[in-house]
Amino acid sequence: MGSVTAPPRALVPGIPVEEGPVERAGAAGTMTSVYLRDSDNSLIELSSYRE
């Protein structure tokens, strides 16, 4: 995903961002997450760890 500095309105046209980017604690350290909903309305988390 790369570096996100401002909340995107949509990562993919027609799919709005539910929440994010936000910092979260993960098993390997701090990560940045963005949340979307799929066509079944399931919540999807896209995340990346800091280097």
Image (spheres, rainbow, N blue to C red):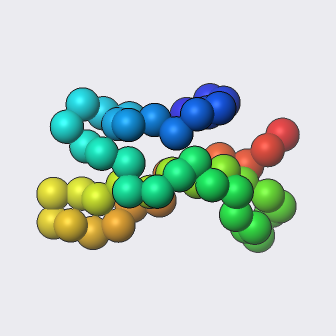
Horizontally, residue 10 falls left or right of residue 41, namely: right
Q: Nearer the viewer, residue 26 or 35?
A: 35
Residue 29 figure quarter: bottom right
Visible residue check, residue 50: yes
Horizontally, residue 24 falls left or right of residue 47, namely: right
Residue 40 figure quarter: bottom left
| Residue 23, position as x, y percentages in the image | 70, 57
Visible residue check, residue 47: no
| Residue 37, position as x, y percentages in the image | 29, 59
| Residue 32, position as x, y percentages in the image | 66, 50
Horizontally, residue 36 falls left or right of residue 14, namely: right
Residue 47 vertical position relative to residue 15 in the rendered view, above or below: below
Q: Nearer the viewer, residue 32 or 48?
A: 32
| Residue 33, position as x, y percentages in the image | 58, 54
Residue drawn 24% across the image and 31% down it? 13
Q: Quadrant of the N terminus?
A: top right
Residue 37 vertical position relative to residue 4 in the rendered view, above or below: below
Q: Quadrant of the C terminus?
A: top right
Residue drawn 46% across the image and 35% down it? 8
Q: How many dots with numbers? A: 0
Residue drawn 70% across the image and 63% down it? 24
